[in-house]
Amino acid sequence: MKIAAVEGAHYHIPLPVTLSDSTHGEMSAFQLVTVRVKDDEGGEGLGYTYTAGRGAQAILSIIRHDLAPLVLGEDPRRVERIWEKMWWGIHYTGRGGVAGFGISAVDIALWDLNARRAGEPLWRFLGGHDPGVRAYAGGIDLHFTDEALLEQAHGFLAKGFRAVKMKVGRPLLSEDLRRVAAVRELLGADTPLMVDANMHWRIDEAIRASRALAEYGVYWLEEPTIPDDVAGHVAIMRQGALPVAAGENLHTVFEFRNYIDAGAVAFPEPDVSNCGGVTIWMKIAHMAEAHNLPVTSHGVHDLHVHLLAAVPNASFLEVHGFGLERFIRNPLDIVDGVATAPDRPGHGVEMDWDALEAHRWRP
């Protein structure tokens, strides 16, 4: 069995509602890159990644011109060999970043192809711990009015969520505290409430915010400062009052090792679409387990539900309102706070290619 084709495409997806955070500002669209890997016996797997608005064309280019030639002719079942070949093939210009996004998409497609070949859902193909995964609604809402913020929280509860995340990082900490207090009052004392600063603060600001936010029973403080500052995250963990979640901007297993070894993170948060794919996500999850840490996720919840369902140290699944569900048949359902990994072979994500076609990027 050999890989016969690697086909990529790039789509510009408008968002139903303009979203906002402290780093990326207002976002009215996102970029989707898909990869279909086909073998010479009729098998096919789907992988995809995304960006917050820029860089997708570069990802598609590296897939088409650099990664595809490396994997064509390889046995798709030898995923570790293929991953290593991609990693070293573009190592000098890669080691994360755009290269990591491209490798991730191809790797996801390979795991999907192999699980489909085996007739198994991906979560069971990877080990199959528990198909039911606790889920939270990830609000991207920093510049929402207070009224819109509360209306969103009401909507999350109505959709079956029993945990919510909101953005922080407003110009004044008092504004963040007022908004967090309002959402906490709406949710009640026992519903997990996470907050996400999107790397906004200096270390002293993050420590001050962590201590102040603890009054409202915040479950975790996410990305309080820039991902490059491991020592800063250690200080926030030790001197602040909240556990730290981080990892959506870490793109190699080695970066996660540095965070975990240093005690810089309580909830490692790899994103399968940029950390190196399923191959690396699972290694990070097992590394976290070896350090007695839970693992959570970022984005692409239709994929991550399988990965969290496969491991014993799963924390919450992040469910983002990126609007991709409009282009996916059988989107994920949340019932009483739990997402259930589907039993369809592979990851079970089937794109509505006809609907996507209207959004294909044509420079």
Image (cartoon, rainbow, N blue to C red):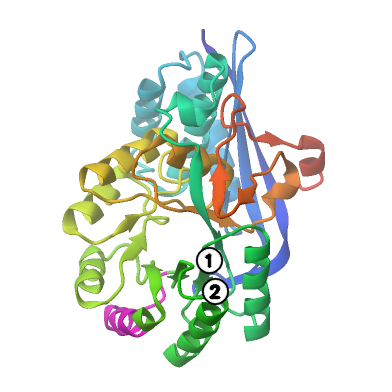
Instruction: Estimate the spatial distance between the alpha carbons at disc 1 and disc 2, rounded to whole Å.
Output: 9 Å
Left or right? Give the position of 18 relative to 309: right
Vertical order, 333 against 38 (above or below): below
Q: Is residue 66 visible?
A: no
Indicate the amino acid at tag 1.
Val
Residue 42: image quadrant is: top right
Q: Earlier in the sequence, mark 1 or mark 2?
A: 1
Left or right? Give the position of 6 relative to 123: right
Segment colored magenta: 199-212
Residue in the image at 45% along x and 92% along y: 174
* Spot occupied by residue 228 in the image (x, y as percentages of width and height): 30, 62
Residue 266: image quadrant is: bottom left
* Spot occupied by residue 239 in the image (x, y as percentages of width and height): 20, 77
Residue named by callout 1 = 164
* Spot occupied by residue 25 in the image (x, y as percentages of width and height): 57, 73
Q: Which mark is residue 187?
A: 2
Q: Is residue 211 magenta?
A: yes
Residue in the image at 53% along x and 21% along y: 120
Element on which disc 2 rests: helix
Q: Is residue 248 visible?
A: yes
* Spot occupied by residue 259 in the image (x, y as percentages of width and height): 24, 56
Residue in the image at 50% along x and 23% along y: 69
